[in-house]
Amino acid sequence: MTTKQIDYCIELARTQSFSRGSENMYVSQPTFSYQIKLLEEEVGFDIFERNGKGATLTPAGQQFVSFLSNMREDMKRAIEQGQNFSAKYRDNISISLMVRQAIYFLPEAIRIFEEKQSHVQITPKFQYEGGMDSFLKNETDILFTLKELTKQLAGTTVHELFKSHIYLITGKDDPLAMKNIITDEDIYGRTLMVGGGSPALLRSVQQKLISSGKISYFNSPDHDTTLTNVAAGRGICLAPGFLNDHSGQFAWIPYDCNDTFNCVLCTHKTDNRESLLEFISTLKKLYNDVVAFPL
């Protein structure tokens, strides 16, 4: 299977016309049709059902073309990244984190680092799920995670970055948004969004509130859904401060609790590049220098 055959297949699925498809791909119709036929012979099933000069996808073809479209987009991004890298950089450091805001100072760290190490590219990879597996497979160089999740990791160096507190998230017009700190009593009588892959510490706090019998709760599958529910007035939620994007869309009020999330960076023990250690040092310095920044 060639990239041309993939492009021809996707284009025929889009236009449902051999003549239009070949014209859009700047080849003759016989060449276009022949390459589609070769592709079908290779995969062993009919991708298209012919009807005169046109074609529609078979059920198997619909699934196949959907996969091809995703693969082609991944290939396009890989080529673009390769072009960017070859044009300017000689080395790359990839960092996996679940959401952009998890490391608030990441953009600033990249800027400072690349002023000194202009030949090294920093590549963030946002993996809401699967970040740990990606790191363990050596697909990423740095992993942002919680220290509690690193106990069973072998061959890993853990770099402590910052401690993050628990906050209550409400709409900005919610009466609780006026408070400077939230106690359990403030939450009684309200509906609390829970679940969504919450860390163990947060689940413990949520369960304590639920077991009081003084709140209602609503299961939410992930953080984005939770924020949507909060915006819709369906409830409030507790969350780690590192998820705050500081956009001002919601009120984030400190929750009266001494427990904190120990946020760390993991690297592979075998990776001793000076550039890697310098980048981590840059990030740590930004967090150490900050004064009264809500985390």
Image (cartoon, grey):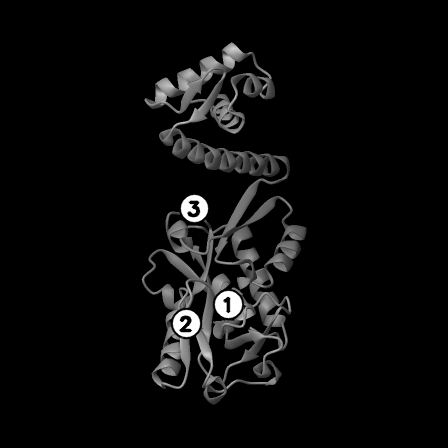
Disc 3 marks a residue whose amino acid type is Glu
Label 1, residues with CA under 10 Å away: few <14, some 14-19, many ≥20 = some
Residue at x 50% of width, y 10% of height: 30
**x and y percentages locating residue 289 in the rendered image:** 62, 71
**x and y percentages locating residue 187 in the rendered image:** 48, 84
Q: Dots 2 and 1: beta carbons under 8 Å?
A: yes
**x and y percentages locating residue 270 in the rendered image:** 41, 51
Q: Is residue 241 above or below residue 72?
A: below
SS class of the residue under badge 3?
A: loop
User: Residue extending furthest front?
Assistant: 52
Q: Earlier in the sequence, mark 2 or mark 3?
A: 3
Residue at x 49% of width, y 24% of height: 3
User: Residue extending furthest right?
Assistant: 115
Label 2, residues with CA under 10 Å away: few <14, some 14-19, many ≥20 = some
Q: Earlier in the sequence, mark 3 or mark 1?
A: 3
**x and y percentages locating residue 91 in the rendered image:** 55, 43
Q: How far apart, in angstroms, are the residues tagged by discs 3 and 1? A: 34 Å
User: Residue extending furthest bottom?
Assistant: 185
Say which mark, if any, is on residue 139. 3
Looking at the image, which is closer to me, 202 or 164?
Answer: 202
Looking at the image, which is closer to me, 13 or 163?
Answer: 13
Disc 2 marks a residue whose amino acid type is Phe
Label 3, residues with CA under 10 Å away: few <14, some 14-19, many ≥20 = some
Left or right side of 146 for 107: right
Pointer 1 residue: 229
SS class of the residue under badge 2?
A: strand
Q: How far apart, in angstroms, are the residues tagged by discs 2 and 3? A: 36 Å
Pointer 2 residue: 218
